[in-house]
Image: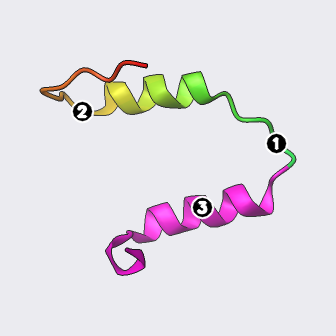
Amino acid sequence: MRSRMGEERLTGLALLNTHRDIDIDVEKIIDRFAACKKRSIKLLL
């Protein structure tokens, strides 16, 4: 799996690990991800 990860994703994961004290709003991340590309399946929780 690691060989398939892009540089940007690895950098993001490293930053998340380094800055664990920062609170992350999961809802905002899901909304941002859902708005990135037009998908044939709607992302719902």
Label 1 crowd (10 A; few <14 / some 14-19 / many >=20): few
Q: Name the residue tied to disc 2.
A: 37
Proximity of marks 2 and 1: CB atoms separated by less than 8 Å: no
Kind of residue at disc 3: Leu
Kind of residue at disc 1: Ile
Occupied quadrant, residue 31: top left
Q: Name the residue tied to disc 3.
A: 13
Q: Is residue 19 left or right of residue 39?
A: right
Q: CA distance from mark 3 to mark 1?
A: 13 Å
Q: Name the residue tied to disc 1.
A: 22
State yes or no: residue 43 in magenta.
Answer: no
Estimate the x, y position of residue 34 in percent, counting from the top left. 35, 27
Total label count? 3
Estimate the x, y position of residue 33 in percent, counting from the top left. 40, 33
Q: CA distance from mark 3 to mark 2?
A: 21 Å
Indicate which disc, 3 or 1, sits on the residue closer to the N terminus.
3
Estimate the x, y position of residue 10 in percent, counting from the top left. 52, 68
**Quadrant occupied by the C terminus:** top left
**Magenta span covers which residues?**
1-20
In front here: 29 or 1? 1
Q: Secondary structure at mark 2?
A: loop
Q: Secondary structure at mark 3?
A: helix
- The residue at the point 47 percent across, 28 percent down is 30
- The residue at the point 18 percent across, 27 percent down is 38
Indicate which disc, 3 or 2, sits on the residue closer to the N terminus.
3
Estimate the x, y position of residue 28 in percent, counting from the top left. 56, 24
**Quadrant occupied by the N terminus:** bottom left
Label 3 crowd (10 A; few <14 / some 14-19 / many >=20): few
Furthest-front residue in view? 45
State yes or no: residue 17 in magenta.
Answer: yes
Furthest-left residue in view? 40
Q: CA distance from mark 2 to mark 1?
A: 27 Å
